[in-house]
Image (cartoon, coloured by chain):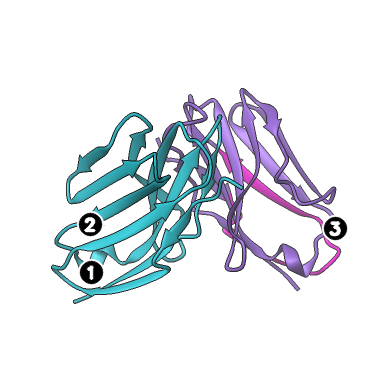
Amino acid sequence: SQQGEEDPQALSIQEGENATMNCSYKTSINNLQWYRQNSGRGLVHLILIRSNEREKHSGRLRVTLDTSKKSSSLLITASRAADTASYFCATSGTYKYIFGTGTRLKVLA
Amino acid sequence: DAGVIQSPRHEVTEMGQEVTLRCKPISGHDYLFWYRQTMMRGLELLIYFNNNVPIDDSGMPEDRFSAKMPNASFSTLKIQPSEPRDSAVYFCASSTSGIDEQFFGPGTRLTVL
């Protein structure tokens, strides 16, 4: 299976701290995306990184991709209570995405 | 644009009944995806369409599940007959391509008693 596996499964931090979550996958990919899901809601796209990119930034988000290790990381800097959500990586082979198991992030005010 | 629209938002039914979930993708999006999310199995891709044509239905769990897309603005996912193990949140998503950002609907929470 191409499914990504996020690590850790759950993370609890204080507001203002940085949060790092990792994603590992098994097969070659075209690109990798990160999504956020608030409780009871649909997924919201955060950032896409292509297989030929190593790092990408968007606001307080920083994503890295290491295709040799088949892994990616998502860093959220200066976390806020509103960042509390589940975060999923999604890997793309050909014309569809396979979602990982997610990391549940809780940011304590 | 209102985003991806799904209906109903909640559905409670009894085992053996037919269930139909509906989705309206974002106008102009050529790809439509149906997902199922459970605590045990996470987010699973059931089927996706390109230009109203089913491309990959390998994720459809069994013959009780069927999906149609009669036109570019409407898709249905039908379960007949429903079983308690079908209880899950079903998401529809659309995209301009099969490999770029997907826009998710709010989901339908299905409970089969």
Give the vertical position of A62 relative to A80 (above or below): above
Task: Report the disc number at residue B61.
Answer: none
Q: Quadrant of the C terminus of chain B?
A: bottom right
Colour in which the image shows chain B: purple
Q: Point out residue B35 in the picture as x, y percentages from the top left corner.
A: 60, 49
Distance Cα–Cα, label 3 vs label 2? 44 Å
Q: Which of the 4 quarters of the picture holds residue A12? A: bottom left
Q: Nearer the viewer, residue A92 or B63?
A: A92
Camera sees residue B11:
no
Picture residue at 74% right of the left edge, 46% below the top: B60
Where residue A28 appears, as percent x and y from the top left, is 50, 36
Q: According to the image, label 1 marks what residue?
A: A81
Left or right: where B16 falls relative to A16: right
Judging by the rendered image, the residue that carries numbered circle 3 is B81
Residue furthest front in the image: A68
Q: Position of residue B12 (x, y in %)?
A: 69, 67
A15 relative to A85 in the view: left or right: left
Residue A84 in magenta stretch = no
- Secondary element type, mark 1: helix
Q: Nearer the viewer, residue B18 or A65?
A: A65
The residue segment tinted magenta is B7-24
Q: Colour of chain A?
A: cyan
Quarter of the picture containing the N terminus of chain B is top left
Q: Which residue is mark 2?
A: A76
Instruction: Find the distance from the CA under tag 2 to the CA under tag 1.
Output: 12 Å
